[in-house]
Image (spheres, rainbow, N blue to C red):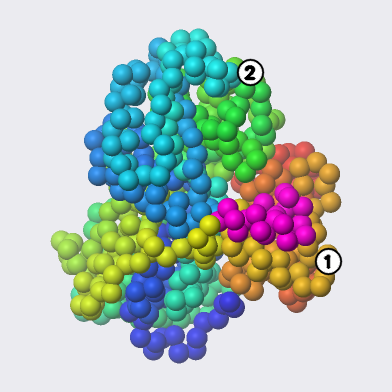
Amino acid sequence: MNRSIPRDIGSYPFDLIIVGAGINGAGTARDAAMRGLRVLLLDKGDISDGTTQWSTRLIHGGLRYLEYYEFGLVRESLREREILLHIAPHLVRPLGFMVPVYERSKRGPRTIRLGMIAYDALSFDKSLPNHRMFSAREALEREPGLNPEGLLGAAFYYDAQAEYAERLAVENAISAARHGALVLTYAKVERLLHESDGVVGVEFTDLLGGGRYTARAPVTVNVAGPWVDEVLSGAGYRGPRLIGGTKGSHIVVDPFPGAPREEALYVEARRDGRPYFIVPWNGRYLIGTTDLRYEGDLDHVEASEEEIEYLLDETNHVIPRASLSREDVLFTYSGVRPLPYQPEGAEGSITRRHIIHDHARDERPTDGLISIVGGKLTTYRNLARETVDLVYEKLRLPDPGCDTDRMPLPGGLTDDFASFAAAFKATSGLSEDLSERLLRVYGTRAPEVLAYAGEDPSLRMPLSSRTSQPTGLIGAEVLYAFEQEMAQTLSDLLLRRSMAGMGPRVALDVDEAAAEVAQRYLGWSPDQAKEEVRRYREFVRRYHPKDFRRHKTLNA
């Protein structure tokens, strides 16, 4: 699956150009390509290297949206949650949530119970169990680490988790490519092409190979997330601002005293009353998120020390035995939600509902251009469906209908994932931990990954030599990422294909070894390998990784 820009791309008759390869762009490309449209998907970076990779990684109905009477959004989200559990069983799994209720809480037990009843009613077709209510004593028996002071009780319900949200986008893009879409990463759209009163294509720069190209299509969808207004500026757009992003930051810590056992905590912060999560994730705990209006550099977003301290302080309050300090933070990550522009009011009140903005309906109409504002990881598939429906209207073509609610993603192609996983573990020849990791990342494609080792046993071995918390990346994954999953850089491999960069050491124990594998098998020169490692380490500096704080050599 090599990246190449056709020489005749300027004259190729695309039906649809999509700008932005996050989860919404990749999902739209998949849907459109599966329906038979000729699709070009462009991104100035890698697949899912924007908002998608900075999410809290939950597939949820949005319990708190009930407070703002967004019943339609909650129903949509719960329906999509059920679909994702079936089409991506390797990436989306059920997760229990406990909501402790305290005397100081803005919402008492009665309000929480009513919300839970509504949540169950809106998910009437779910496969997950209904909610349960616990007394204070029952809540402490289930989660003894909770602060007992002022505890009135708790609610328990199920949502789901996408442990590796990046992989959802990657597999959507792979599926789009398999159905004929041309996917070009590191292709920056410089401007939109105009003719008369409409957009007829884009001009983009190849950031890897150099050169400037044009591509034409009767419809262009701008789904660039926080960068939507930036893309529109290249079209001479003179309408109102569309995006008013808010920043969300997370911290990742090792298991700690009092941590929830097998479920997440959904907690109302003591300081400002906003909800945040303490989530079992990737063998550790993901704590977040914040919600702050953001006007800074969209290409370099990082958690502030104030946000980190806020999350530590709130966690230590609800779980007193945790006693987490700054030193316990393995790494952080932060991103910007592409929400509708709303200069005033509480950040939490800004709708999470997506808006499909047809610029043909603007005060100064521009035909052939659609911009996507907002959108949630949970509802990406339905957003894509609605967008492609509109594209077919604009193209005035007969619509064959959407099938993405029934067709599994590439790693979910099995009727019984549990049986597939058991068979793979029994026959792979790998340790239980390595087999499990490959299944969690690649699903039913895990045997394909392992096949890249061939007869070379070194490609089946972990690349990390660490004895404490080693990263489980194996050499075969390096080859697979570049040859089958459109990876172009070491960062693509570590952060958005193998997911090694989301481990406790953010892959700083395997980055050099992975580059050596690429040098040995993929033709990288020594200078290229060294430069890729340098760029990777420079990028993950924004994560504030613990290894950077400890080892001066990594900062050199």
Residue 501 on image: x %, y %? 66, 52
- Residue 430 within the magenta-colored segment of the rendering: yes
Q: Foreground residue, 110 or 344?
A: 110
Rendered position, 80 above or below 61: below
The residue where tag 2 is placed is 321
- Residue 228 shown left or right of residue 331 in the figure: left
Residue 475: give x, y in percent of width and height: 75, 64
Name the element at disc 1: helix
Residue drawn at x 23%, y 78% is 397
Residue 385 spot, x, y in % from top left:
31, 62
Amino acid on which disc 2 is placed: Arg
Q: Amino acid at mark 1?
A: Pro
Q: Is residue 14 visible?
A: yes
Which residue is tagged 1?
457
- Viewer-closest of 43 and 441: 441
Callout 1 touching callout 2 (CB < 8 Å): no
Can residue 276 be seen here?
no
Q: Who comes first in sequence, dot 1 or dot 2?
A: 2
Magenta segment's dominant SS is helix
**Horizontal relation, residue 466 to residue 71: left or right:** right
Quadrant in the picture for the N terminus: bottom right
Q: Residue furthest top?
A: 149
Q: Which residues are magenta?
A: 417-438
- Seen at 55% across and 72% down, the residue is 207
